[in-house]
Each structure stands twice: as structure tokens, then as C-alpha cells.
């Protein structure tokens, strides 16, 4: 009876939050104990819907944006912008923690019950594959936010995050090491890929995991772990399924992070949340990274008075988790770090041909040909900043590479994130610690 009440509560909370929008073409089921394939699909919908828009908040911490101090949302986001994670204003939006674990909670129910209740059909296998991969991805995001970067020499002792893989409302969560969390992530990924039935999702359900999304996830994970050969191979496997890019020289092309873009792999995360997009401008020093002939300037940004604002957010059609451009950049970085310069340049030029005017592309080709390998890696990292601007990955890139000094201003004061600042690892939320002293 207790389990039945838990299921009813889960569905009542989760499914009432589900609504149709431009690409989440979903109809929720009633609040019943899930027993059929349709019921478990609905439970997975709740898991996807519960997944938070935390990447938009991470954008505030980077060098991409500066704050509009007159925004109506400024009280909610200013302390995030100022890296004030301790003693933040009571109005400050919380970083993702409870919401991510809520999403994991749904996946745990699917994994625990779907096969026994709904059978071993291909449809159920696909649902289970997505559950394993979403659970893995959620833990991966928690690690990248709240733990040190993976270091093979210290991962067995570095504090990670709590692992949640079972349905138990009474369990006490304690942090596991980075090594143990990654072990669980990789186990879930193996389970997910073994069950995967769908190579690529239809546009209307692009928020769901697929074989293509799995390969993109593995490519990113291996890159962040410094496993260059594995990262390059995963990127190749993903591009073997679909290698298309939007050509910005074509005026009819879509924004690359549009969920209907030909290069979209998975469109789950709301990386351009409205309360951030309407409260910020593009940092001029970041805008200076784009050179003459870069077509992304006018496609990604637009003038607003004397400043520029983002065109990549403020609408859920620009949700993005993985897309092909990132796979080309992963292939470029991984092969460059392996000393395979020709392969790195080939991957990079494929992308640049679709992002630069013909003249600018010719100039870029000539420059790339004479770069040292070290300078090529720097160029690729700069290209990641340009291509993936405001898609929630810049913070992770800064954290895993140079951890540079960043300066933000607010009310005529300068606030500094120092080089190698401890705040590159975000503290567990205060509310989480107060609710669970074991943290």
C-alpha cells in the first residue's frame, strides 16, 4: 500500500507539470499506479520534465554575460552572477540539486518496475534505456557542478556527490567519491546502450535519449575525463549516424541550437531561460572573440540599444543538450591533444566552413595550417567558446582547462573570481545541507 501511495504521489506531482509546447508533444496519463508501457512512458516524461534549467544559471558565472542591473529579475540572479554561493540573498534562485535528484527519483522507479510490470517488449527496453541514460547524465551534471574535475590520481579520494539508484524515501544520502560516481555513471551508460532501440529521435520528441545522444554523451564525458582517444571515437560514432551542420551562409538556415535544426541531437535542457536572457547583455570582451566574417555574430546576437543580447534563449525551441557542432569540436580537441594535427584541423575546418564567410574561411584555413599543436588547442578552445556560446558549457570548459580570472561588476563595484578560485567547484546548496547533515 505504501508503494502504491508513493506512485500516486509521484504521478500527481510530476504529470500535472507536463504541458505541450513547440516540441514536447506529450499528453499525460492519469494518476495511476504504472503497469503498462504507456504508464512508464508517462513516468519518463515526468523525469524529463523535472530536469532543471541549471545551465542558464551557470552561464551567469562565466565571461559571456554582464548583468542588467535594472532588470526585474536582478534580485533572483545577482548573487549567482557574483559567485556568492555562501550567504546569498534569500531571493536567489537555487542551483540545481533537489530538482536533479527529483528527475533521478523518477528514473529509479522506471528502472525498478518497468520490465516486471510492463514486460520485456522493445518499447519497454527503449524506456529503460532512456531511464538509465538520464540517470547517468543527471549524476554527470551533478559531478561537474559540485565536484572537482576528474583526476585519475585523486578521483578515489575526491569528494563527489551522493549516488541515488534505488527507490527508498528513507535513505540517507552521503557523498561518494568522484571515482565511485563515475563508475555508476558508466555502468548506467552501459545498461542504457545495451537496451537502446532508437538510433535517432523524431523532431517532436527530440528531448529523449537515442543512440545518437548516447554517443554524444560519451564523447563529452570522455573529453571531460581527458580520455582523448575514447572521446574521438565516440564523436566519430555519433557523426556516423548523422554529420549534418547548419550552413549559416544560407540565409534560410536555422539557428544550430534550434530543436528543428538538422544538427540537433538532443533538445532537453533549457539553456537560455527567460529570466536570465532578459536580464543580461553579451560581455563586450566575449563578443570580441568573434572576428570579421564570422556569421554567428548576427545569428547568435542582436543589438539592443548600445549593447548586444542573445538570440539563442528565451524560447524553449532553443533547448539543447547535444548537437553535431560539439561533436566536431570534441573530435578536434581530442585529436589535437593526441598530437594528430591533421585530423584536428579536418574536423575544425568542416565546422568553420559552415560558420564563416568564404573569405573568412580562407583566412582561417591559412592560419590553422601554421599553428603549433599547442596554439591549435588554444584555437579549438576559443572556437568552443564561440560556437557553443550561452549553451551552458562555457563554465565547464573554463573549470576543466585554465580556470582563468573573471571580473564582474555590479553597482559600480568590481567582483573577482580569481584564477584557480575554489568557487570553480560550487558548494552544495545550503538547503540541501540543512536538510541532510550527512552532506
Image (cartoon, helix red, strand yellow):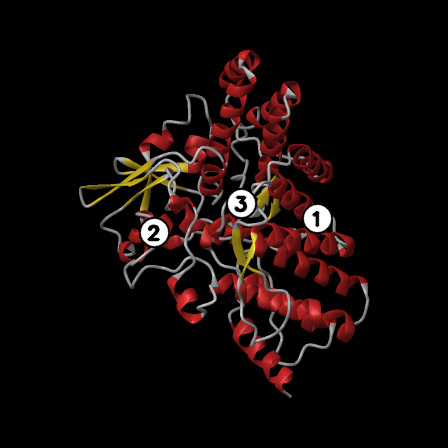
Q: CA distance from mark 3 to mark 2?
A: 26 Å
Disc ID at residue 20: none
On the picture, is 374 further left or further right than 129? Answer: left
Q: Which residue is mark 3?
A: 258
* Marks 2 and 1, how far apart at CA: 36 Å
Residue 208 shows in this picture: no
Q: Is residue 121 above or below residue 247?
A: below
- Asked where in the image residue 231 lies, by quadrant, the reply is top right
Residue located at (53% from left, 57% from top): 161
Q: CA distance from mark 1 to mark 3?
A: 16 Å
**Helix, strand or loop status at disc 3:** loop
> Which one is earlier in the sequence, the residue at label 1 or at label 3?
1
Residue at the image point whose x is 42% and y is 57% from the top: 95
Residue beneath disc 2: 80
Q: Nearer the viewer, residue 332 or 182?
A: 182
List x then y, in percent, for residue 350: 61, 25
Nearer to us of marks 1 and 3 is 1
Crowd class of label 2 (few under 14; some 14 to 19; many from 20; radius 10 Å): many
User: Residue 434: image x %, image y %?
Assistant: 39, 69
Horizontal and vertical percent position of residue 127: 71, 62
Can you see residue 400?
yes
Asked if marks 3 and 2 touch (Cβ < 8 Å), the reply is no
Which residue in the protein does label 1 denote?
200
Amino acid at each position: 500500500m505504501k508503494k502504491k501511495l508513493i506512485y500516486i504521489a509521484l504521478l500527481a506531482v510530476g504529470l500535472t507539470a507536463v504541458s505541450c509546447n513547440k516540441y514536447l508533444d506529450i499528453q499525460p496519463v492519469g494518476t495511476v499506479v504504472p503497469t503498462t508501457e504507456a504508464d512508464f512512458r508517462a513516468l519518463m516524461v515526468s523525469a524529463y520534465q523535472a530536469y532543471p534549467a541549471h545551465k542558464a544559471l551557470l552561464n551567469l558565472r562565466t565571461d559571456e554575460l554582464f548583468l542588467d542591473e535594472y532588470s526585474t529579475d536582478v534580485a533572483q540572479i545577482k548573487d549567482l552572477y557574483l559567485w556568492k554561493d555562501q550567504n546569498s540573498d534569500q531571493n536567489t534562485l537555487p542551483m540545481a540539486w533537489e530538482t536533479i535528484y527529483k528527475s533521478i527519483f523518477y528514473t529509479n522507479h522506471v528502472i525498478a518496475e518497468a520490465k516486471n510490470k510492463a514486460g520485456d517488449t522493445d518499447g519497454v527496453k527503449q524506456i529503460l534505456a532512456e531511464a538509465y541514460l538520464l540517470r547517468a547524465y543527471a549524476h554527470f551534471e551533478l559531478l561537474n557542478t559540485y565536484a572537482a574535475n576528474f583526476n585519475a590520481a585523486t578521483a578515489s579520494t575526491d569528494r563527489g556527490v551522493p549516488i541515488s539508484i534505488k527507490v527508498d524515501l528513507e535513505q540517507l544520502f552521503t557523498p561518494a567519491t568522484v571515482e565511485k560516481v563515475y563508475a555508476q555513471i558508466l555502468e548506467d551508460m552501459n545498461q542504457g546502450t545495451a537496451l537502446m532501440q532508437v538510433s535517432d529521435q523524431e523532431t517532436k520528441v527530440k528531448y529523449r535519449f537515442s543512440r545518437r545522444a548516447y554517443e554524444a554523451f560519451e564523447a563529452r564525458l570522455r573529453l571531460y575525463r581527458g580520455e582523448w582517444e575514447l572521446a574521438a571515437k565516440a564523436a566519430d560514432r555519433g557523426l556516423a549516424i548523422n554529420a549534418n551542420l547548419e550552413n549559416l551562409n544560407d540565409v534560410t538556415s536555422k539557428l544550430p541550437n534550434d530543436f528543428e535544426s538538422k544538427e540537433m541531437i538532443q533538445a532537453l535542457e533549457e539553456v537560455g531561460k527567460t529570466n536570465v536572457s532578459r536580464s543580461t547583455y553579451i560581455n563586450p570582451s566575449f563578443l570580441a572573440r568573434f572576428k570579421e566574417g564570422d556569421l554567428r555574430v548576427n545569428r547568435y546576437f542582436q543589438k539592443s540599444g548600445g549593447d548586444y543580447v542573445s538570440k539563442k534563449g528565451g524560447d524553449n525551441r532553443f533547448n539543447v543538450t547535444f548537437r553535431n557542432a560539439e561533436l566536431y569540436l570534441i573530435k578536434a580537441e581530442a585529436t589535437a591533444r593526441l598530437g594528430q594535427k591533421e585530423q584536428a584541423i579536418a574536423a575544425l575546418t568542416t565546422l568553420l566552413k559552415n560558420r564563416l564567410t568564404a573569405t573568412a574561411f580562407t583566412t582561417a584555413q591559412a592560419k590553422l595550417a601554421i599553428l603549433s599543436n599547442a596554439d591549435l588547442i588554444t584555437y579549438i578552445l576559443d572556437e568552443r567558446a564561440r560556437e557553443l556560446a550561452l549553451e551552458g558549457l562555457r563554465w565547464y570548459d573554463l573549470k576543466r582547462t585554465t580556470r582563468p580570472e573573471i571580473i564582474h561588476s555590479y553597482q559600480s563595484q568590481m567582483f573577482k573570481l580569481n584564477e584557480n578560485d575554489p568557487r570553480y567547484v560550487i558548494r552544495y546548496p545550503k538547503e540541501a545541507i540543512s536538510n541532510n547533515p550527512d552532506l
